[in-house]
Image (tube, rainbow, N blue to C red):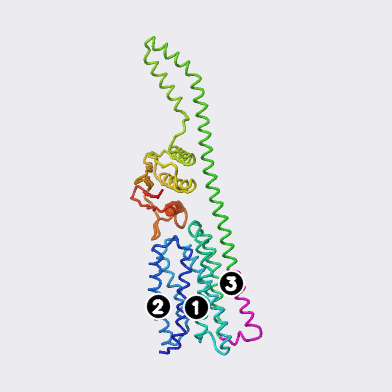
Amino acid sequence: MDIDRWFSALPNFLVLLPSAASCYYTMKNQMKYTLLKTAALCAAVLLPYAFICSALIALLGIDVNIILLPSLILFFFPYRYTVTAGLSKCLAVYVGVCAVQTFPAQFAYAFDAFLHPASGAANFSNEAAFFQLMLSCLVAAAFAWPACGLFFRIVDCLDTPKIWHSTILLSSVFLIFNIVAVPKSYRTLHTGRMFFLFLFLEGCMLAILTAIYVLFYLGTTVILEHAKLKEHAHLLEMQSRQYRALQEHMRQTARLRHDFRHSVHLLSSLAKEGDIGSVQAHLAEFESSFAKNTPAYYCANAALNALFGYYHEMAASSGINMDWHIELPQPLSATELDMSSLLGNLMENAIDGCLTIPEGGRYFSLTTETRHGNKLYIVSTNSFDGKVRKGKDGYHSTKHSGNGIGLTAIAAVAEKYGGSAQASNSNTEFYVDVMLKI
C-alpha cells in the first residue's frame, strides 16, 4: 500500500467530521440523543470509515471523490435517524452544509494548482489535503455561532415543507456546480487569468450562498413573527369576546337587581295565597334569567380564561360532550403566549379530531392539575375516527404533508419549560399527556 497516498487521502475523509458537526448546529433541540452521545456515535462511525476508505484509495489508486461523493448520500441516513426533525428540514440542512463545505475543497484545489501546476485533481497533494481540512474546520467554526444562536429557531418553529424544499433546490445548485467545476487538470487554471477568475468566482459564489442563507433567515423570521402576532391577535380577540360577554352579564344582573323588589312582592303575595306552584315557577324563571349569559370561569388568568371559553363554545356548538377539570396555578411561571400556544393547539387538535366522527359519539376530556408543588400535568382525551399518519419522528398531519404543527408546538413549549409531551392513540381515542415544570 502507498503510505504517502493513504496519508494524503485521509484528510479528505476527515473533512466529514467538521461537516457532521455543522449538520447538528441547527438541530440542537431536535437531537434524539445527548450531545456527548451523538458526538461519540459520529466519531465511532466516521473515524474508522475515514481510515478504511483512505486505505482503499491507496490500494486501488483511484480518485478520492469516487468514494467521497457517494459517502455524502450514504451518511444522510444515519443523520436522519439521529434527529427528530422532519425529512424536508433534515434534507435542507444536510444539503446546505454539503454545499458550503464544497468551497474549502475548491480553494484547496486552487492551492494545490499553485503548488503543483502540472498536476491535477486526481493527484491531490498532502499539503492541499491538510489545507482543505483546515479550511473546513474554519468554515464550520465560522457558521457555528449563527447556526446555534439564530438558525436553530427556524428549524424548531418553521413547519412549512415548501419553504424547506426551496432551500434544498438552491443549495443543490451550488453543490452540483462545485462538483462539476473541479479542475481535472491544473494546467487549465494557469491559462491566462483563469487562476484568479476561478478564485474570484468561488469567492463570489460563497458570498452569494451566505447572503441567500441570511435572507432566508430574515424572511422566515418575519414569517414566524407574523404568525406570533397573529396568534396574539387571536388571543386578544378571544379576550375581547369574553369582555363583551361580561358586559352583557353585568347589564343583565343590573336589570335583575332593579326588578328584584317587584319579584319579592310577587313571591310574597303568592306565598300568602298558598300558590306554591307559581312560587316555584317564578323562582325557576328568575334563576334561568340570572344564569343566562354568565361568562364561564375556568382560571384566574384573563387571557387563558378567554381561551378556554372560546374553545368550549366551539366544542359545544359542534355537539361535543365535554368533561373539563381546569386547575392552573396563579401566577404562572410560563408566559401567557406560551400557555396559549400549548393549550390552544391542544384544544384545537382535540376538537378537529372529534369532528371526524358523527355527532353522537363526540367527546373531549381535558384535565389540568398541579402535582408535587412544581409540576403542571395536562391530560387530553378525545374521540376520533382512528386514522393517523405516523412516522419514526412522531405523528404527521392528516391535513398536509409534514409533521403535525400543533403537536410540534405543544412539544416545543413543554421542552422550553423542562417538561415533556407524549401523544398516543387507540382505534377510537387520541391521547396527549403534557408535563411542565412551573
Point out the tag, 1 or 3, that comes first from the N-terminus: 1
Cβ–Cβ below 8 Å for labels 2 and 3? Answer: no
User: In the orientation shown, which residue stands out farthest toward the top?
Assistant: 273
Q: Residue sitting at 61 percent across and 78 percent down?
A: 199
Q: Residues within 10 Å of mark 3 (few under 14, many from 20)?
A: some
Mark 2 vs mark 1: give the one in front.
1
Query: Which residue is tagged 1?
Result: 133
Question: What amino acid type should be assigned to the residue bearing mark 2?
Answer: Tyr
Point out the tag, 2 or 1, that comes first from the N-terminus: 2
Question: In the image shown, does 199 or 427 lie closer to the viewer?
Answer: 199
Q: Residue sitting at 58 percent across and 59 percent down?
A: 218
Mark 1 vs mark 3: give the one in front.
1
What is the span of residues highlighted in magenta in the rendered image? Answer: 185-209
Question: What amino acid type should be assigned to the residue bearing mark 1?
Answer: Leu
Asked if the stretch drawn in magenta spans residue 80, the answer is: no
Question: In the image shown, does 157 or 364 lie closer to the viewer?
Answer: 157
Query: Which residue is tagged 3?
Result: 206
**In the rendered view, would you say 42 is above or below 368?**
below
Evaluate whether residue 169 shows in this view: yes
Asked if the stretch drawn in magenta spans residue 189, the answer is: yes
Q: CA distance from mark 2 to mark 3?
A: 29 Å
Query: Which residue is tagged 2?
Result: 49
Q: Is residue 320 left or right of residue 123?
A: left
Dot 3 falls on a residue whose secondary structure is: helix
Q: Residue sitting at 39 percent across and 62 percent down?
A: 32
Evaluate whether residue 397 shows in this view: no
